[in-house]
Amino acid sequence: AQTVTQSQPEMSVQEAETVTLSCTYDTSESNYYLFWYKQPPSRQMILVIRQEAYKQQNATENRFSVNFQKAAKSFSLKISDSQLGDTAMYFCAFMNRMGGTYKYIFGTGTRLKVLA
Amino acid sequence: EAGVAQSPRYKIIEKRQSVAFWCNPISGHATLYWYQQILGQGPKLLIQFQNNGVVDDSQLPKDRFSAERLKGVDSTLKIQPAKLEDSAVYLCASSLVGSNSPLHFGNGTRLTVT
């Protein structure tokens, strides 16, 4: 069975600094997708960034980028130039196709606080 | 496009009472998910629909939870009777069918069982 582990329950960073959130996963599949979702206090989960496992190039979305290490089964999120609005829970998620449908597994989350 | 709509936003009930949550997915999204998110944890899948058929309800406590998706659009999730451990945020999400379609979430319903 697939598992997703986020080993940092809480992190903080100064505004304008860079922070990296860790995520590791376990799977025997070769074709899958990885996501980072942000959940602010409003509770709505918002997609931050996604990575296809077959792509070697790390995904980037503005200030957000990932370090995808397929062999190590590691998928970390780097937030550059942190802003107060980045304060939120961040969830790493694994998705693959099983039995004709797409299955998602979420990690336990990392609470990020950006300090002024 | 309009997002995933959920109601109510908050609900407080006593144990052994019943409660229902409603979700309207993004138009055209064939796949609909209900997740339970207990405080401090990641979302846990309760049930997944594709159109109006159930594709995964393996983690749904069927003795007290039920869900339906009429006409492959709106969905309701019901708990009867509620227990204290059901206190959580219930998230609805939808997606297009296909590997390149991420989940789109609603704002969730925070349920408190006293």
Image: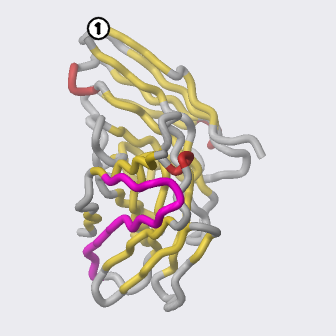
Q: Which residue is labeled 1 in the image?
A: B14
A44 in relation to A28, above or below: above
Q: Residue at x 35, y 23 (%)?
A: B79
Q: Nearer the viewer, residue A35 or A79?
A: A79
The answer to if A50 sits in the magenta stretch is no
Find the magenta span and give its range: A11-28
Q: Nearer the viewer, residue A54 or B24?
A: A54
User: SS of the residue at dot 1?
Assistant: loop
A70 in relation to B34, above or below: below
Q: Nearer the viewer, residue B54 or A116?
A: A116
Q: Residue at x 53, y 59 (%)?
A: A16
Q: Residue at x 56, y 71 (%)?
A: B99
Name which quarter of the figure residue B64 lies in: top left
The color scheme shown is: secondary structure
Q: Residue at x 29, y 16 (%)?
A: B113
- Classify residue A61 as left or right of residue A70: right
Name which quarter of the figure residue A11 lies in: bottom left
Chain of the residue displaying label 1: B
Residue B53 visible? The answer is no
Q: Position of residue A72 (x, y in %)?
A: 28, 85
The answer to if A21 sits in the magenta stretch is yes
Residue B59 visible? The answer is yes
Q: Position of residue A80 (x, y in %)?
A: 53, 67
Q: Position of residue A75 (x, y in %)?
A: 38, 75
Q: Nearer the viewer, residue A79 or A30?
A: A79
Amino acid type of the residue tagged 1 in the rendering:
Glu
